[in-house]
Image (cartoon, rainbow, N blue to C red):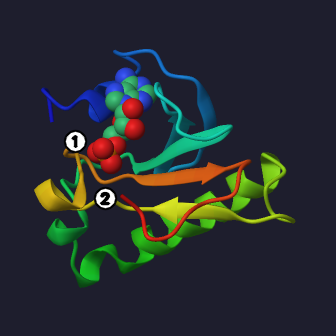
Amino acid sequence: MSDCIFCKIVNGDIPSTKVYENEYVYAFRDLEPVAPTHVLIIPKEHIQSLDYMNESNIELLGKLMLAAKEIARFEGLSENGYRVVNNNGLMGGQTVNHFHLHLVGGRSMQWPPG
Ligand code: AMP
């Protein structure tokens, strides 16, 4: 999608700090981190949100989750734990309409979220 900032990041038109990439997935550091580690994990394909996914995306969703686990390991988070978040739609707090997982770690997380 030409006006999507995350598509522009995947294409290299907007700079990002890449932490991981494979054929389907791209991951980069969040510009405004909320924890010592804050990585965004996105599909290279433009999909607006979880709500726009269906059975055809099951494998992609698995790849995104496993990428989160791998990145957590690279970042040294596996032992003490970490959080993976998906904000979906307006009331879910989604501000960029390209599906993404937030991997956050390096501090204790609170529950319930805000
Ligand atoms: P969400 O609010 O769940 O849609 O998350 C969007 C995230 O994208 C926020 O945490 C922003 O800080 C982050 N973000 C927006 N633009 C950029 C960018 N150009 N590079 C890195 N992170 C970004």
Marker disc for residue 95: 1
Where's residue 95, x and y in %? 22, 42
Q: Which residue is mark 2?
A: 87
Q: Amino acid at mark 2?
A: Asn
Where's residue 56, x and y in %? 27, 78
Point 29% across, 33% down: residue = 7
Q: Amino acid at mark 1?
A: Thr
Could you tell me which secondary element the residue under label 1 belongs to?
loop
Mark 1 or mark 2: whose residue is earlier in sequence: 2
Point 37% across, 45% down: residue = 44
Q: Would residue 40 be found to the left or right of residue 71 on screen?
A: left
Q: Is residue 94 above or below residue 66?
A: above
Point 12% across, 55% down: residue = 90
The answer to whether mark 2 is within 8 Å of ligand 1 is: yes
Q: Would residue 82 be found to the left or right of residue 104 on screen?
A: right
Residue 75 visible in rendering:
yes
Q: Quadrant of the N terminus?
A: top left
Where's residue 10, x and y in %? 39, 32
